[in-house]
Amino acid sequence: MALALFDLDKTLLGGDSDFLWGEFLSEIGAVDVDNYQRQNQKFFDDYAQGKLDINKYLEFCLTPLANNSVRQLKIWHQQFMSEKIQPILLEKAQKVVDLHKKNGDKVIVITATNSFVTRPIAQAYGIEELLATEPEMIDGKFTGRVSGEPCFQIGKVHKLQQWCKTNNEALEGSYFYSDSHNDLPLLELVDNPIVVHADDKLKKVAAERGWLSLDWT
């Protein structure tokens, strides 16, 4: 058995769930539309360019969680799954997930996007194990802050290492599938780095190092 790790946005999905959640909140009038969409696009562009200030971004994207009840958020998320996520689930990605399961591997989604947004998406692929940025909750309500270290760049490595320690798992034979150069710290850690829908920076690194490159769209 090996660990099979999957990034979520633009890897398992044909889009970015965090960005789409922001778009969805704007469309239903849950946020100040013009301001929110403008900031959402800027942070999205910063991420693509490798210059995202993760703390400022999380302050931005976790605020709507703090401003609404968990009950209301769950109702919105069901609609979000139907309208935004179901159309970008990838059949080829599902087949790879299923193959790893068939081989007895432990399948994990590891993503910078917060767990409220991503857990139902991981479950849609039949994946129960999720390592994500955790939004803080106190007395059953989101605070708008992060609990622990964001699961971003080197934070993904730290999250995985802690998970392995807690679960007595090893990285021998491990796989990691990702589209983003922001995931290079984890891609360099596993035994089998695999790039999927790679951005330009990651595509260059993958070519130089002979990493397998896939397209699931």
Image (tube, rainbow, N blue to C red):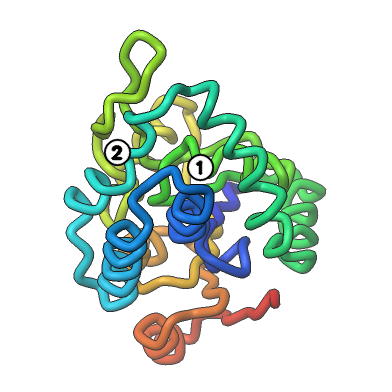
- Marks 1,2: beta carbons within 8 A: no
Dot label at residue 63: 2
On screen, residue 41 above or below 215: above
On screen, residue 158 above or below 32: above
Indicate which disc, 1 or 2, sits on the residue closer to the N terminus.
Answer: 2
Q: Look at 37% across and 18% down and name the residue there.
A: 141
Q: Residues within 10 Å of mark 1 (few under 14, many from 20)?
A: some
The type of residue carrying mark 2 is: Thr
Residue 149 in the figure: left or right of residue 174? left
Q: Residues within 10 Å of mark 2 (few under 14, many from 20)?
A: some
* Residue 15, horizontal then vertical, whole percent: 56, 67
* Residue 73, horizontal then vertical, whole percent: 51, 31
Question: Is label 1 or label 2 in front?
Answer: 2
> Label 1's element?
helix
- Residue 180 appears in the figure: yes
Residue 27 in the figure: left or right of residue 121? left
Nearest the eye: 215 or 115 = 115
The type of residue carrying mark 1 is: Val
Residue 71 in the figure: left or right of residue 69? right
Nearest the eye: 211 or 134 = 134
Q: Look at 36% across and 41% down and name the residue there.
A: 133
> The C terminus is located in which quarter?
bottom right
Nearest the eye: 10 or 181 = 10
* Residue 190, horizontal then vertical, whole percent: 45, 59
> Label 2's element?
helix
The residues bearing labels 1 and 2 have C-alpha atoms spaced at a distance of 13 Å
Extreme residue in the top direction: 139
Dot label at residue 117: 1
Residue 189 falls in image quadrant = bottom left
